[in-house]
Image: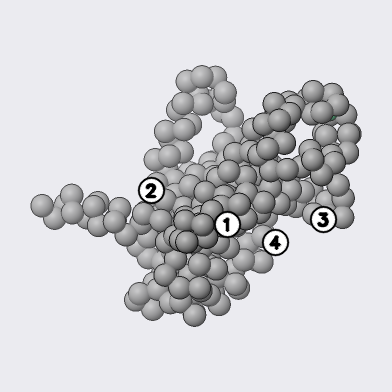
Amino acid sequence: MEICTALIFFLFGIIFGSFFMVIGIRLPQKIPFISERSKCPSCGYQLTWYDNIPILSYLLLKGRCRKCHWQISSLYPLTEASTGFLFALCYMQAGSPAELLLSLLFISLLIIIIITDINYMVIPDKLLAFFLPVFILLRMIKPLEPWWALAAGGLAGFLIIFTVILWNRQGMGAGDMKLMAVLGIVLGFPQIIATFLLACISGAFIGSILLRFGTIQRNTPFPFGPFIALGAILTYFLGDPLIQWYLNLFMK
Ligand SMILES: [Zn+2]
């Protein structure tokens, strides 16, 4: 029964992931999400419902436009599958309905930000402004322990990036700073510090691989938001054991 419900969350996640991709591509360009049908960016072919089935259409069309064979970004099936997987994980981990809702919204925000930051190097203010009051409300229903961890997390998230920007003007921006403040409210303190460290480690790791294979050049601007998102996801699901393990390294 448990597995069946997790599977339903997975399928919903895939469908939402497909919608988040549309939001992530359209929001920074100010195109309405729903009223306009998706088109092939290369030939303008208007996608039918059977071109739009998450993951399946991509596999059946072998990642190409039906009409002009333009290569579709693998970000589409990847986003859909990851959202499905994470939604199922949210369901399995949540201890209460409020925590489940919070975790689903948290993942939704992070997935959309990964897409906008990879494609346009922006973290839209509108998106943060939409999620912030909902997160605060849900954190009042399902508070962190201790109660002040919410404010400390938000403040610490803001200050870490603020310090980095003051110290070294490149690499991180105001968008990253606001994002970390919002995530700090959900994750709390010291979890938000773990998020930042995991973002730096994964950014350095993936950045060095991309440099090695010539995908990016040394001076290519590099979005940091996707790594913050990755760090936040790891902290949300594994944070407490991870922090405990890290502290134990020094206690022995
Ligand atoms: Zn086309």
Residue type at numbered disc 2? Leu
Q: Which mark is residue 126?
A: 4
Which residue: 46% across, 76% down?
142
First in sequence: mark 4 vs mark 1? 1
User: Between marks 3 and 1, how big is the CA–CA gap?
Assistant: 24 Å
Q: How is the image coloured?
A: one colour
Number of other residues with Cα within 10 Å of mark 3, as a class: few under 14, some 14 to 19, many 20 or more: few
Task: Point out the quarter of the image occupied by ligand 1.
Answer: top right
Which residue: 64% across, 32% down?
74
**Disc 4 vs disc 1: which is toward the camera?**
1
Label 2 near label 3: C-beta < 8 Å? no
Q: Is residue 32 visible?
A: yes
- Image coordinates of residue 52 in percent, x first then y, are 76, 42
* Res. 135 image quadrant: bottom right
Which residue: 30% across, 53% down?
242
Question: Horizontal placement of 247 versus 46: left or right?
Answer: left
First in sequence: mark 4 vs mark 2? 4
Label 2 belongs to which residue? 197
Which residue: 82% across, 34% down?
41
Label 2's element?
helix
First in sequence: mark 3 vs mark 2? 3
User: Between marks 4 and 1, how big is the CA–CA gap?
Assistant: 30 Å
Q: Is mark 1 within 8 Å of ligand 1?
A: no
Residue nearer the viewer, 8 or 137: 8
Label 1 belongs to which residue? 8
Q: Is mark 4 within 8 Å of ligand 1?
A: no
First in sequence: mark 3 vs mark 4? 3
Q: Is residue 123 visible?
A: no
Label 3 belongs to which residue? 34
User: Between marks 4 and 2, how big is the CA–CA gap?
Assistant: 26 Å
